[in-house]
Amino acid sequence: QVQLQESGPGLVKPSETLSLTCTVSGGSVNSDNYYWNWIRQPPGKGLEWIGNIYYSGHRNYNPSLSSRVTLSVDTSKNQFSLRLTSVTAADTAVYYCAREDEQYSSPYYYYYLDVWGKGTTVIVSS
Amino acid sequence: DIQMTQSPSSVSASVGDRVTITCRASQGVGSWLAWFQQKPGRAPKLLISSTSTLQSGVPSRFSGSGSGTDFTLTISSLQPEDFATYYCQQAHSFPRTFGQGTKVEVK
C-alpha cells in the first residue's frame, strides 16, 4: 500500500525559501499514470492546490503561486519536492503531498487525489 | 480558474439524518468532480471520484451525483463518524480547485 510522508523545516523566516520533500513508500514515483501533488491548508481554512509533477518532469502549477514555486522529482530517492520562495506569513499552512491517479474510462481520462500524506505544518515567522 | 462553491457552509444534523451537500462549479467540469472528507488534524480522505464512484472501503450511505456544473454529496443516514468537513474538488482543468468546505456538526 502506497504511503506518502512529508518532511522539512517547521519554521521558516519571512522572505526565505520553504523546502519540503515527500517520500513515497510502497510504490514508485517512477510510475505511469500517477501525478505527484502538493496541496496546502492555512489554519482554519480550506484547501489550496499548489501544483503537480510527473516522473518525467512535466509540471503544472497554480498560477497564483507559479512565480514562487518549483516542483522537482528525484526518482533515485523515490521522492518529490516543493520549493516556495520569498515566503510571508500568508504561506503558513499545513502542507500535504498527494498522489493523483490517472484512469482511463472511454473516452476520457479521469484524475483523483487518492493517497495523501499526513501533512506537515510550516509556520512562517521571524 | 474554475471556482467551486459549496452550500451550505455548515449543517447541524443528528445521527440517522439524511444530509445533502451541494457543489457548484463556475463552468462545466463534466464528471471530473471528487468529494473528500476531512476530520480535525487529519489529511483529507477521498470518498467519491468521477462524480459518483465510491472509493473502496467507503460506506454505501455516501453517494454522489450530478454533472456539468451542479453536484451533490448525500449521506443517507448520518453516523457518528461522519461528523467532519467535506470538500468538493474539480479535476477537469488546471489549477485544481476545491470548494470552501461544508462542516457537518452535531445538532
Image (spheres, rainbow, N blue to C red):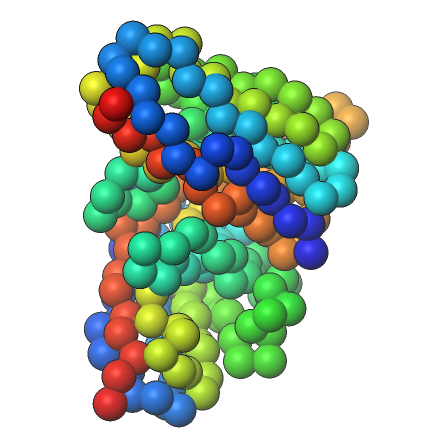
Q: Is residue A86 above or below residue A75?
A: below
Image point (23%, 78%), residue name: A11
The quadrant the C terminus of chain B occupies is: top left
Evaluate whether residue B21 shows in this view.
yes
Depth check, front residue: A76 or A22: A22
Picture coordinates of residue B81, whole percent (x, y): 23, 23
Image point (31%, 20%), residue name: B13
Q: Is residue A91 above or below residue B59?
A: below
The quadrant the N terminus of chain B occupies is: bottom right
Evaluate whether residue B82 shows in this view.
no
Depth check, front residue: B3 or B46: B3
Picture coordinates of residue B63, whole percent (x, y): 49, 16
Place residue B42 in its image quadrant. Answer: top left
Picture coordinates of residue A105, whole percent (x, y): 68, 25
Image point (27%, 74%), residue name: A123
Q: Is residue B2 above or below residue A60?
A: above
Say whether residue A126 is left or right of residue B48: left
Say whether residue B42 is left or right of residue B28: left
